[in-house]
Image (cartoon, rainbow, N blue to C red):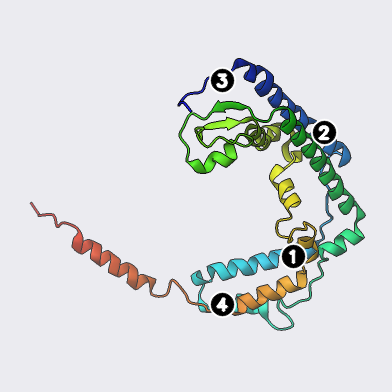
Amino acid sequence: MGDQIVLDRDVRDWVLVPLTMSIVLMMLIRQYATQVLMGGGKPQQKVELKEVKEKQTVARSQLLRGAHVFLTEGAFRQRKAYLTAKGTGALSQKSEQKSAQEQMLTNPDLMSGMMKQNLSGIVPQIAMGTFVSYFFSGFILGKIPFPLSPSFRLMLQRGVDLPSLDVTYFTSLSYYILLLFGLRGVFMLFFRENTIDETQMYRQQMGMGGGGNPMAAMTSADPTKALEAERAALEMVDHKWKLEGAEDRAADVLRARLKQAPHKRKP
């Protein structure tokens, strides 16, 4: 095909503009429908002080493992004993935090809120995808003003199978997907924290981290095992103070720099 393709104005009037308006209206309807179903906000989970304390303890242990080289041996052993001491250590205690499965059993509002959120997102998504594929499939809408590698062809030219077509041209289906994710930043200016997260919704649909089931990752989490794993990881750390002999190394570097510096002659 030629290097340049002249797009018909009817494509702009009957495909580009209606498709853009349809996506914006669909996202607005879904946003307000989600707020109505969720009662004006996202499902809130009750957090207890003990749960926050355990999470902070694990975070403190992880920070100690990552930055222990900047502590002296005595300071490291003191912190390690506080966290891993048998019977009295902060990581040796039995977790009082409820698992995700127990939280859903004791808090029905959490489960119903998740179901409402998924329902308000998946149903409009399927309906809009079917609508776009039926009415707007197979159109070339524009061209990106900078060159791209052929690896972008699958992302930009969905619905049009033309290997000879320049990869910088994008189709209506690709425009729909890009606009669906790109409008989230605009919606955040108006709806703030209540904006629907498209990436999180797709992760839930694909079941990432749960072996194909988004609920499996939640039900498999065990707070007690997490504390035990972190305690074992901290006990295996071989401490070595990184600042030991730092004065001598700094003096050697300074002497080397002084030898390399040009000597000034006295007048």
Residue shown at 73% from the left, 78% from the top: 92
State left or right for residue 49 relative to residue 143. Answer: right
Disc 2 to disc 1: CB gap under 8 Å: no
Observer-side mark, 2 or 4, equals 2
User: Circle 2: is it few (<14), some (14-19), or many (20+) Cα within 10 Å?
Assistant: some
User: Circle 3: is it few (<14), some (14-19), or many (20+) Cα within 10 Å?
Assistant: few
Q: Nearer the viewer, residue 262 or 227?
A: 227
Q: Which mark is residue 53?
A: 1
Observer-side mark, 2 or 3, equals 3
Task: Give the CA separation, mark 2 to mark 1.
Answer: 36 Å
Q: Is residue 90 visible?
A: no
Q: Nearer the viewer, residue 58 or 162?
A: 162
Secondary structure of the residue carrying numbered label 2: helix
Residue type (three-letter) at the residue carrying disc 3: Leu
User: Circle 4: is it few (<14), some (14-19), or many (20+) Cα within 10 Å?
Assistant: few
Q: Quadrant location of residue 19? A: top right
Task: Give the CA separation, mark 2 to mark 4.
Answer: 51 Å
Residue shown at 74% from the left, 46% from the top: 201
Residue labelled with disc 3: 7
Query: Residue 130: x, y in percent?
Result: 76, 35
Mark 3 vs mark 1: which is more N-terminal? 3
Residue type (three-letter) at the residue carrying disc 1: Lys
Task: Give the CA separation, mark 4 to mark 3.
Answer: 64 Å
Residue labelled with disc 2: 32
Residue shown at 74% from the left, 67% from the top: 54
Mark 2 vs mark 4: which is more N-terminal? 2
Residue type (three-letter) at the residue carrying disc 4: Val
Q: Nearer the viewer, residue 21 or 110?
A: 21
Residue type (three-letter) at the residue carrying disc 2: Tyr
State left or right for residue 147 relative to residue 106. Answer: left
Task: Give the CA separation, mark 3 to mark 1.
Answer: 61 Å
